[in-house]
Image: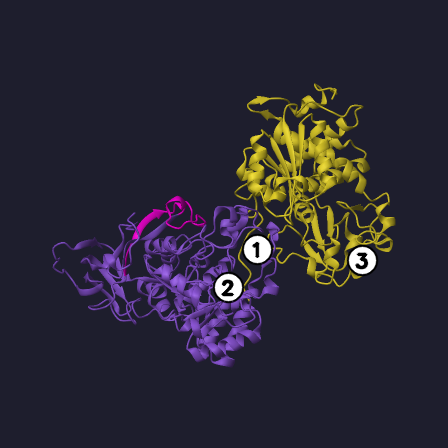
Chain colours: A purple, B yellow
Amino acid sequence: MAERRPAGAGGRATVVVRGGTVIDETGERRADVLISDGTVTAVGPDLDIPAKATVLDAGGCLVVPGLVDLHTHLRQPGGEEAETVETASRAAALGGYTAVLAMPNTNPTIDSAAVAREVLQLGETALCQVAVAGAITVGRAGQCLAPMGELAALGVRLFTDDGTGVQDAGVMRRALEYARGLGVTLGQHCEDATLAAGGHMHEGAWSSRLGVPGVPAAAEELMVARDIMLARLTGGRVHFLHLSTAGSVALVAGAKAEGLDVTAEVAPHHLSLTDGELSGYDAVFKVNPPLRTECDVAALRAGCAAGTIDAVATDHAPHPPEQKEGPLDVAAPGMLGLETALAVTLEALCAAAGDEKGKGAMSLHDVMALLSWRPARIAGLDVGHGGDQGGPIGVDGPANLCVIDPSERWEVDPDHLASRSRNTPWAGRMLTGRVRHTVYRGEPVVIDAEAQR
Amino acid sequence: MTPPSPLPDADELKPPPLSDAGRHLLSISDLGAEGIEEVLRVSDAFVEVASRPIPKVPALRGRTVVTLFAEESTRTRLSFETAAKRLSADVLSFAVASSSVKKGESLRDTVETVAAMGVDAFIVRHPSAGAPAQVAGWVDATVINAGDGWHEHPTQALLDCYTIRQVLAERAGRPVSESGVGDFAGLRVAIVGDVAHSRVARSGVLAFAALGAEVTLVAPGSLVPPSLEGWPVTGVSHDLDAVLPHVDVCYLLRLQTERGAGSFLPSIREYTAGYGLTLRRAGLLADGALVMHPGPMNRGVEIADEVADLPRSLVLRQVANGVAVRMAVLFLLLGQVVRGDATGTVADLGHGYGPVDG
């Protein structure tokens, strides 16, 4: 691994992505992509390859705008034993991401310009862009509004107390009103603390049989419903984080039909795994919100296909082994996601992929929308990511690209992940679809599924 | 708003992946009807051993058994330790209060440290559901669940089954050793009380139903598990008076009195009024109906003082049988094959082995 160097330093080289199928918001076409000095300089079939150009083979692959993750726990500052900005960004690059949104539940919380600056600064040498989400309330304690104006001035576009929901409806109302004035979005981790209290998995048949205290679907749905009402009341913009239940999807569909300014994301594990995974009490499957039922998985998949859900976001949540190997009710919730999200999402949603639970209903193009340009827009990262304001991968556009082999089968080996942590629920499983190359600001940060620094 | 999940039938809910059925006893579902029957049959031999002047056999001589109790339960620990000692095993008692767990050591480190001393079986009591299953994944030793959170307490269910079988055999005037489990077919069992938070209820339901009994749960709405999908029960009732005349066994669960503090129940008094087996209610039971309780009893709460001492109450007999049944479990899991050598069979116990000094 090379020494650290500022991002973009490697982006001076000339790079050709050759022989792939370009998919962006505007459509799909066979084309090579020529990149120099960090920008796309030519797009078209059978381009002449300049001498000394780095050639990235994209034969049989998709060439898409770099993926954008709305929900990443980088753990720095304060949780460096689990993950750092550098290691998470390497995992992100390997997963095809060229931008991630850092969640603010660090220690200290990202609730001031000082902490936000620290994370942004760490991100300057990362293998992808690191954008920052700020906390809605000071210390994520749910009481006093964090200095959103100060943070917005640094470019923060999304605020959330993720890890917990803002419990007090009055506080959430004021936050939405204040956020509206700044033109920023509030992301809500929907979980009513009184209904969820003491729960460690989905409340249902499995929790009842296993004797594990549960979190009912209603704990999430209650806050989704409340925040829809608050969005209506305030005109504020709400983004629902990691929705996990069929009821939540129905509520958001209703709010969108009504024309409210709401968006929603889903995590790959909620599109793929169910509470039955916890039958062996393995805490690697403990996550918040919890894995739910087959019906919920089906509704979330349908919500993606119907456009109710706007984005797939990883909720990448690294934990060191000692926080994951204890009893289920002691272990920390959360699972890794950056390096597996693309494959899991393709298998869950895409008509061209499909797993044992049946093929999805969506085209590759529509799945890429959920992973790239739609989340880019929600995070305010659509200048430079997701194809630059929805435009095509074209001349003078930003060279943030991801090359995907949709048919490659690979086995997830926790010991070969770039994350500092090992808590992947897909350990030992075969997945289909893999990132072959990632180009960030013109620099090939991943070549042939290997990180370059 | 979530539709009911399509799912886990009882079969699917069976052995957790961590459980290496046959080597451990983590859940009643590790045993199935045949396994339960075998435990009951072997228990007969150990009940006989208990009646000897020196109630001890050498079946597990040289084996080491650890009781690892991360939650205090003097009765269960003493019962297991007595069982292991009567089988001549060496018994180590790991009491959490005085242990490194309090110093911040993880469960895994604790267990692996003890395992490194050379241990054949861990008997685990833990406040977290699933902890014994996790221990089974970390060590080579046999693991016996002595109660984990709200999940299961399989030896309690086995000793309850044994006690029922023993009493029904006596009534029929035949030796218990000649009883199979036929008496359980159609036996009507009511499990009464805090089912939601009860490991005794989860193991009991599985065991009684596996042997053919019809199990009804009787509980206030707030103490019924959120879902009973896949539970082999015939129904749930909130009317104990209506159920009592139609049961053969009334199994009362211990009410953890902190549940009566106003969130699950308005008060202990209201619980007793609705679900306590008062003397009046005991009068509703059919003549031969049995009253059982896993102990320790809250006299005056789930069971009236006078009812606890009625002849139909089997509470002390449950305790007495507990030792023999736990001997059977230890013997079946540890006694038959010792690192490749056979040390004995059940038949040997009745004939070949005599009392030993010890």
Going from N to C along the chain, the mark reached first, 2 or 1, is 1
Mark 2: few/some/many CA within 10 Å (<14, 14-19, 20+): many
Which sits in the foreground, A383 or A191?
A: A383
Which sits in the foreground, B208 or A135?
A: A135
Q: Position of residue A285 (x, y in %)?
A: 50, 51
| Numbered circles on residues, count | 3
The residue that label 3 is drawn on is B272
Q: Secondary structure at mark 2?
A: loop
Q: Is residue B245 magenta?
A: no
Up the image or down, A444 lies above or below A322; here it is: below
Mark 3: few/some/many CA within 10 Å (<14, 14-19, 20+): some
State yes or no: discs 3 and 2 in contact (Cβ < 8 Å).
Answer: no
Label 1 or label 3, whichever lies nearer to me, is 1
Residue B161 in sight:
yes
User: Mark 3 vs mark 2: same chain?
Assistant: no
Give left or right: position of A432 versus A293.
Answer: left
Tell me the tag on residue A200.
Answer: 1
The chain letter under disc 2 is: A
Q: Position of residue A208 (x, y in %)?
A: 61, 54
- Three-letter code for the amino acid on which mark 1 is drawn: His
Residue A259 in sight:
no
Give left or right: position of A384 versus B22.
Answer: left
The residue that label 2 is drawn on is A245
